Amino acid sequence: MGVAQRSRRWLVPVTAVAVIAGVGTLGPVVADASPKLPGISAQDLLAKVQTAKVDGLSGTVRSDADLGLPAIPGAPAGSEQLTEMLSGQHTARVAFASPDKARVSVLDNQAERVWTTDGKSAWAYDSSRREAVKLTVPEHKTTKPEKAVPSYDPQAVAKQFLDAIDPTTKVEVSGTEKVAGRDAYKLRLVPKTDKTTVGSVTLAIDSKTWVPLDVTVMPRTGNDPALEVGFSTVSFDVPAASTFTFTPPQGVKVTDKKVPSQDRPKRVAPKQVEPKQVEPKQVEPKQLKPGTAKAGEPTVIGEGWESVAMIRGAQTAQLTGNGPLAQLLAKAPTVSGTWGKGKVLTSRMVSALITDDGRVFVGLVTPDTLQAAAAKAPR
Amino acid sequence: MSPNEVAAEPTEALAVGERPSAGRHTLALFLSELRLVFGRARTQVGLGVLAAVPLLIGVAIKIAGSDSGAEGFIGQIAGNGLFLIVASLGLSLPFFLPTAVTVISGESLAGEASLGTLRNLLTAPAGRSRLLAAKMVALAVFCLAATMTIWISGLIVGFILFPVGDVLLLSGSTVSLGEGLLRALGIAVVISLSLLGLAGIGLFVSSLTSTPLAAMAATFGTFIVLGILTAIPQLHAIHPWLLIYRWQSFADLLRDPPYWHEIGRNLLLQGGYLVVFYAAAWAKITSRDIT
C-alpha cells in the first residue's frame, strides 16, 4: 500500500469532523431562515398583538441571559434566586389555559421546580427538597396576566402607544423569523438615546395567533444577546385540565400557606432555611439604623431608557470590610463629582454607582449617565 | 510470548482459519470477540465492582437511616428501593463506568498487538474493517452489560433492603412501579449509549499503540481533560461540543412527560464522537504496516 493511498484513508475521519461540525453549527442557522410573510406596519402589528387571544397553550421556554453581572462569591442568601434566573440558561415547561389555569416547571439538572394553579389552589413543588407548598389563591387572581380584552379600538391604542414612545424609541418591523417552528414577525425597539446600554429589544410575534413568542435584548456593544427568552416548542391546543392539578405524592412534605392575596406562588427558597451565611445581607443593617426611613424604597430619576433607580441608605461601612462584595468594590474605579464621591461598577448591561454617603444608583445606562443622575438626585 | 502459546485466543484461531462464508464468518468473528472481551478476568472484575456499587450505597443508606435528609435520588432510596437503581447509575456515571469502558476499550486493539495476535489478524487485509467492527460491537455490548449489571444489582439490593412502591417523578406526579422500572431501564440504556463516544475514543487510541496500559492511560487522560474543560465556565461556548457535557441528561426520563430534547442532543453528540473516532481508528488500522 502506497503512502498516498494510506494517507487518503485519513480523509474519512477528517471529513467526518468537518461534516459534524458543519451540521452542528450551521444546521440551526439554516433552519432559522426567514419565512416569507406579507408586509405589515408596526402599528398594525401592535394592534394585532392586543387582539391576541388564546384559550390555551403549552410549550417549552428557554432563557439565556448574559448580563455580564459579576459573580459575587458567597452572595447574600435570598439574592441567589434572582441572580440565578438572570444568568445562564434555563429551560421551563409552561402551560396555560384560559382564564386562570397555569403551570410552570423549571427543568433543573436532575431536579424540577413546579408552580401550578388550577384556579382554586396553587402548588409549589421542589423535587430536590421533596417539599410542596399549597397556597389558596384568591378568586380573581391568576398567575399569568390575562390576555387583553378587546373592548377598545386596538388601532387607536397602538397609535397612542407609538406616539408616546416615539420621542425615545424607534419602532419598526425588522423582518421575519422562525420561532419554535412558527412564522413570526420581528418587532424591533431601538432606543434613540446613546445613554443606555440597551442596543435593541426585539419581539418575535406569531403571525397567526399574534402572541409574542420570543424576546431578545441586545446590548449596545457586542453581538451576543444579553437576554433571550422564548419558546423552543409551542402548541396552541388547550392543555388537559389534569395538567394543572397537583396531588401531593406520598413522602412529600406539604406546607399549607395562607398568603396575602397579591402574591404569586413562590418557591420555598431552600436557602432561607439554612443558617445565615457569613456575609450579612447588605439591606438589613440599614433598616435597623435609625434616621434612614424608607431605606428600601427606590426613587426613579430620569425617563425612558435613561431611568436610574436610586436606593438610599445603603450602609457603605459594610462595604469596606473584607467581604466578597467589598473586594469587588475595591477593584472598582472611584469617581467623584458635584454629587460626592463613589465607586462605579459596570457590566455589559447594568451599571451601578455606590456613593460614600450611602446611596446606590442602578440602571441600564452608561456610567456617565449614572453620574449625571446622581447630580440631579435629591440628597 | 510466542504465537503458539496464544493460539488458544479465539480471534487467533479464526484469523488463521479458513473463511467458510462471509456471513457465518462475520457472526463467528463477532461472537468470538464477545467471548474474548467477556472472558477476560479484568472484564469480570470490572462488572463485579459495578455490581457492588448499589450494594455499597444501599447498605450505607440502610445504616444511616431514612432521615438522612439527602437531596436528589439518594434521598429517595430509603422511601423507595427503586431509586437505588437510578442513584447507583447516576453515581457510577462520572467515574466507575468511564473507568471500565476505558480499560476495556484500551485493551481491544492494543491488547492484541501486545500479544502479537494482531499481526495475524491483519494479514488478511479484507478482514480489517470487519475486525474493527467486531471490536466496536463488543465494546458497545460491554457498555450495555455494564449499565445492566448496575440495573440488575440495584434492583435486587433495592428490593431486599427497602420498601418499594409507586414511583415519584421529578415533576411531582406518581407512576406505577412497573413504569418506574421501565424508566430506570431506559436510563440504563441511555447511559450505556452515553458511553459510546468514550468507547470510540478508546478504540482509536488503542489502534495507535501496542501497549494496552498506554492506551488506557491516554483514554482516561482524555476523559479527565474533557471533564476539566466542562467544569470551566469561561469555556461555555465550546461546552455543547464536549463529550460529557450532557451526560447528566438521563434524569430527564424521570420527568412527566419525559423531556427528550437534551437526551437526543447527548446521543447525537455521542454518535458524532463515535463516527469520527471510529473512522480514525479505521484509517489507522487499515493503513497499518504488518511488522
Image: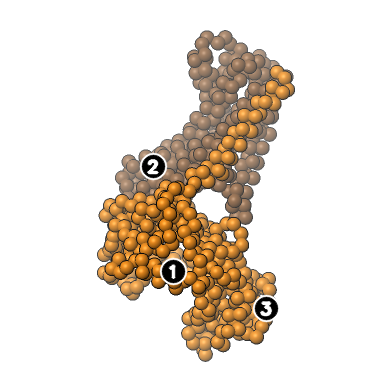
| Residue at the image position 64 percent from the left and 22 percent from the top | B286
Location of mark 1 (residue): A162
Q: Secondary structure at mark 1?
A: helix
Q: Please determine whether, in this image, residue A78 is positioned above or below residue A92.
A: below
Check chain identity for marks 2 and 3: say if they share one.
no
Q: Give the residue type at disc 3.
A: Val
Q: Nearer the viewer, residue A267 or B262?
A: B262
In x, y percent, where is residue B178? 32, 41
How far is mark 2 from mark 3, CA to CA? 59 Å
Which image quadrant is residue A10 in? top right
Q: Colour of chain B?
A: brown
The residue at which mark 3 appears reads as A335
Q: Which chain is orange?
A: A
A95 up-or-down from A166: above or below:
above
Q: Quadrant of the C terminus of chain B?
A: top right
Residue A39 is situated, as x and y percent measured from the top left of the image, at 43, 54
Disc 3 on helix, strand or loop?
A: strand
Q: Amino acid at mark 2?
A: Arg
Foreground residue among B86 and A262:
A262
Q: Residues within 10 Å of mark 3 (few under 14, many from 20)?
A: some
Most distant residue in the bottom direction: A291
Residue shown at the point (52%, 87%) measured from the top left? A292
Residue identifier under label 2: B183
**Coordinates of residue B41 in the picture (x, y in percent):** 57, 29
**How many neighbours does mark 2 have within 10 angstroms: few (below 14), some (14-19), or many (20 or more)?**
some
Q: Nearer the viewer, mark 1 or mark 2?
A: 1
From mark 1 to mark 3, how far is it between C-alphas? 38 Å
* Residues tagged by mark 1 and mark 3 found on one chain of the structure: yes
Q: Chain of mark 3?
A: A
Q: Hey, what amino acid is under mark 1?
A: Leu
